[in-house]
Amino acid sequence: MSGPSAAPAPADPGVPDRGVRPPRLAGLLIAVAAGTLVSVGLGVYGRAHEPAFFAFNVAGFSSGTAAKAWLATIAFLLALVQLVSAMVMYGRIRVAAPSWIGGLHRWSGRVAVLVTVPVAVHCLYALGFQGGEPRVLVHSLAGCLFYGAFVAKMLVLTRPDAPRWALPAVGGAVFTLLTALWFTSSVWFFGTSGLSF
Amino acid sequence: MKRYAPLLTILAVAVFGGVLLAVNSAGDPANQGAAAPAASPTAPDPPPTSDAPPAVDEVVYAGRSAGDEVTVAIAVSGGRAVGYVCDGAAIEAWLEGTVSGAEVRLASGDGSVSVTGSLDETASLGTVSVAEREWSYAADAVEAPAGLYEGRADVRGVANRIGWIVLDDGSQVGLLDAGGRTGPAPPLDPADPDGVEIDGVPVAVTTVGGDDEVITP
């Protein structure tokens, strides 16, 4: 976007903040605050925005709800990859961590979250935040919280000064929320409509 | 660079979401057709002309979907049909369409709600789809006071429109649209249609037949 001339890459010499160590919780608190803002923002948008039942046949949703259910299932499977690769990285699974495990964790996560985006946009735009029945309420809440947790997770990654437990904690929250989302949508859908494509 | 990669991930998600949202908005009712690359899985638009003579002349049908998700009313007159689909809570849509032989096809102005079914002198059976959901429905031919009613009122500058479906057993399902906001419909007494008020403002109630215009641009 910023024109042909490559902007000078942010120089990254010396890593000045390694030695300084500001209050260790500050980074975590900022990340959680940013995530909270995202969650609340999504919820407010979903609630205030008039559900436009129309918006579905767009952007790859030729087969409607089934497409959403399958995309969410892909995201959930990738989230399982996330869980296992994270456990390997943290030594919870006793195998020698292969050198590519970090790349696998990063890229499966990126793909997973990108795959959820069309689903979430459709949910938010066409349906909005709803609380008519428990399943729908849980799904709406988890959907808003998921992206907040995702933002918090990404921000914690950029904070080497965050407490050690912070990353597994937010990462676990992201995984738990995605699992809740998947159970309240795809599993429900496949359970009621059968395994349809 | 590596340290900023998570921020790029957030940015990618935000941009992707924003683009999809923009595509959705652009593809909304206003300019449908041009902006819908994927073929609509349901609700082909009603054909402009009916090729077979309609099987019935003037009948009003009222009934429910199989699981009572929505209530459906269809009024036909000659080859033309209008309909109203409503769940009494959040879903409502006015539809127009055609009758061709023993087949009726209706769609709402934006195409999000559609009804396809067969009809004869006694009943109409078929499928009603709302957004991505589809239900089968069964609607009996009904006589007044059962049928489809529309109410309109201008309440302090806000256009209020109500749809009511009165079923054969006397029960009714309706919804109020007040300037785009839906709410519960005031009860309708079919014997006294002029008695309906919204905040003290009298509502003009009419019965809807198959030759009425119900989709407003």
Image: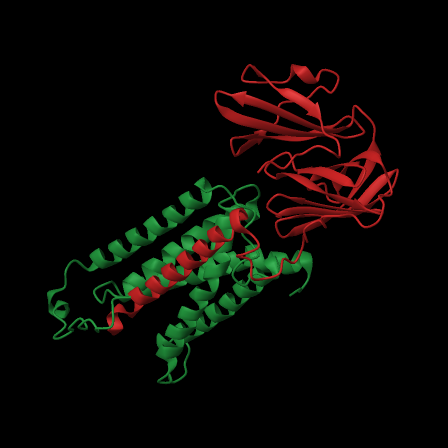
At 51% from the left and 61% from the top, the residue drawn is A59
Q: In this view, does B157 lie to the left or right of B125?
A: left
Residue at image coords 72%, 15%:
B192
Q: Please name the residue shown 81% across and 50% down the image.
A: B51
- Quarter of the rendering containing residue A35: bottom left
Which of the image's four quarters has the N terminus of chain A? bottom left
The image quadrant that residue B34 belongs to is: bottom right
Percent position of residue A62, x then y:
60, 61
Please indicate whether residue A147 sits to the left or right of residue A63 in the image: left
The image shows residue A56 at horizontal and vertical percentages of 56, 54
Q: Which of the image's four quarters has the C terminus of chain A?
A: bottom right
Residue B138 lies, with reference to residue B150, above or below; the image says below
Tally the numbered discs. 0
**Chain letter, colour red in render:** B
User: Can see residue A58?
Assistant: yes
Q: In this view, does A126 lie above or below A191?
A: above
Task: State which quadrant residue B121 falls in.
Answer: top right
Name the residue rendered at 28%, 62% in the picture. Answer: A156
Q: Residue A32: percent from the left, percent from the top?
A: 30, 54
Q: Can residue A165 be seen in this view?
A: no
Residue B41 falls left or right of residue A119: right
Question: Chain A appears in which tint?
Answer: green
**Where's residue B190, x and y in %?**
74, 20
B154 with respect to B76 (left or right): left
Can you say whether B123 is above or below A122 in the image? Answer: above
Q: Which colour scheme is used?
A: by chain
Q: Which of B99 and B169 is in front in this view?
A: B99
